[in-house]
Amino acid sequence: MPTYDYICENCDHEFEQFQSITAKLLRKCPKCKKMNLKRLIGSGSGIIFKGSGFYQTDYRTDSYKQGKKNEKNSASKTPDKDKTKAKAKDAKPGEKSGQTPKSKGN
């Protein structure tokens, strides 16, 4: 809930009021009891972000981070030769690996 600044136009009494956004404006001055209160427009408070960042991955558990690290290490140990052999094996004779066959015209 925000804090609003009020001033009485009758007695110049200034004060802050902590109230809900949906609450009605105050009209009666607590000091002189007249109905001359006016809510002041303020700059409000800014949001302050502290820390290295606010990403979903910043809040991962240690076990999750260790599992991802192990997964990454095991993937880097797998040789790329097996992947290229599989692509070459699937290719039709006369085609180069990684190319799609051209359709025969009408």
Image (cartoon, rainbow, N blue to C red):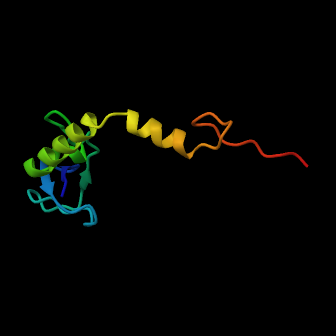
| Pick the front one: 2 or 40 | 2
Most distant residue in the front direction: 93
92 left or right of 86 in image: right
Among the 4 quarters of the image, the one containing residue 73: top left
Q: Which residue appears at 55% of the width and 46% of the height? A: 90
Visible in this render: residue 12? no
Q: Position of residue 11 (x, y in %)?
A: 15, 48
Q: Position of residue 26 (x, y in %)?
A: 22, 62
Visible in this render: residue 3? yes
Q: Which residue appears at 12% of the width and 45% of the height? A: 66
Most distant residue in the right direction: 106
81 left or right of 55 in image: right
Quarter of the picture holding the N terminus: bottom left
Q: Position of residue 71 (x, y in %)?
A: 21, 45
34 left or right of 89 in image: left
| Pick the front one: 59 or 22 | 59
Q: How many marks?
A: 0
| Pick the front one: 82 or 10 | 82
Q: Which residue appears at 26% of the width and 46% of the height? A: 40
Among the 4 quarters of the image, the one containing residue 97: top right
Among the 4 quarters of the image, the one containing residue 51: top left
Q: Position of residue 77 (x, y in %)?
A: 24, 35
Q: Which residue appears at 53% of the width and 43% of the height? A: 89
| Pick the front one: 9 or 81 | 81
